[in-house]
Image: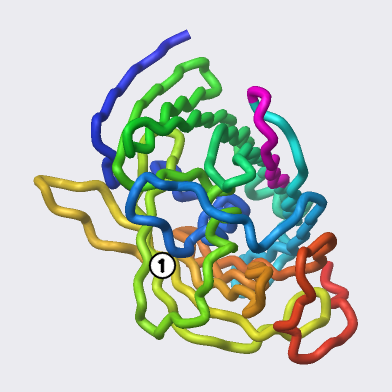
Amino acid sequence: MKKKNVTRTKAETTIVDNRQILLLTLIIVVLGCLPITSSAQCARVNKAFSPGECVTYNLYFNWKFIWLKAGIATLTTNSTTFKGEPCYNIELLSVSSKRVDFFFKMRDTLTSVISQRLEPRHYRKGALEGKHYSVDQAWFNYNKGLSIVEQTRTYQDGQVVATTDSSAHCIFDMLSILAQARSYDISSYKPGQKLEFSMVTGKAVAHEELVFQGKENIKADDGNTYRCLVFTFVEYGAVTQGKQQGGKEVVTFYVSDDQNHLPIRLDFYLNFGSAKAFLKNVKGNRYPLTSIVSKGSPCDQE
């Protein structure tokens, strides 16, 4: 087994290497893009979800002007323990459809263990994407006002890249950022307001940005129309000669304007096409979906 170690004493801003993940990984990135504390005091009160919540999405990909159903994603939250500590276990399972498997097969499982105060403890992503398989893991610790994260990425050939980062700012994975961000009050946001956060990528800590665009009513695949908060997600390139590379808008997404803050629809701007994700079903939500402005029958889209 080949192993390469890289140690950094300060969180770097860098772009994720693999930008060709078909759908779901991008979904989880953008789900979590909400305001993050500016210090390493990373604990927060959970105001948005309860164990037993399960959310399902239909995924669609635009292929030569034709929209194809690309697969499904299921996001579940349950209670667990981690090193004797009561925690939440959040898992995302994404599976591409048979039609999409012909072009790009995807079988991804992402798991994040967070404390009941919404602090990340451990993260694992096992990803079969196309012909490539890799496993990312991250372990989170806190010491003297710093967030410390140790990451590994294990490739299909056995090569392991290990990194250590520390920062005075909170560092999250793709699922723990979602869990914490859902508890923020975003009712006072103004169009154009920008929010920044740091997130592990398996090989580094990336700088990301979210821009609030306003509100819009959106129809989901459960047949209901929701009042949504609209955001665009911007990712940045690596720092070169002391300068941050320009940002790239990759997703527009729509979050329910209620206490659940559930993603209802996501529009992706990918290098190889465009994609959309629509809420299909939600069970175990903590609060009533008061953002529903009109009800209808579930869409019959295959």
> Residue 87: x, y in percent?
67, 38
Given residues 274 and 169, the one toward you in this image is 169
> Which residue corresponds to the image point at 40% horizontal and 22% vertical from the top-left?
162
Q: Quadrant of residue 11?
A: top left
Magenta portion: prevailing SS class:
strand
Q: Position of residue 150 (x, y in %)?
A: 42, 27
For the magenta stretch, what is the residue range?
A: 83-93
Give x and y (percent) for residue 194: 35, 71
Residue type beneath disc 1: Leu
The residue positioned 47% from the left and 32% from the top of the image is 140
Residue 242 appearing in the image: yes
Residue at the left extreme, as displayed: 241
Q: Quadrant of residue 135?
A: top right
Q: Nearer the viewer, residue 80 or 268?
A: 80
Seen at 33% across and 18% down, the residue is: 5
Crowd tier of the residue under label 1, counting other residues whose Cα lies within 10 Å: few below 14, some 14–19, many 20 or above: many
Using residue 149 as the reference point, say whether residue 296 is left or right of it. Answer: right
Residue at position x 27%, y 41% in the image: 12
Q: Is residue 132 in sight in this rendering?
A: no
Give the number of callouts. Answer: 1
Image vertical order of residue 284 relative to residue 150, above or below: below
In the image: residue 126, left or right of residue 95? left
Q: Could you tell me which secondary element the residue under label 1 belongs to?
A: strand
| Residue 195 against residue 223 in the figure, above or below | above
Q: Which residue is mark 1?
A: 210
In the picture, measured across the screen, residue 60 lies left or right of residue 142, that is right
Magenta highlight on residue 169: no
Q: Position of residue 279 (x, y in %)?
A: 73, 69
As displayed, is residue 65 above or below residue 157?
below
Q: Is the image coloured rainbow, by chain, by secondary structure, or in one colour?
A: rainbow
Quarter of the rendering occupied by the C terminus: bottom right
Instruction: Tell which residue pokes out farthest to the bottom in this image.
Output: 294
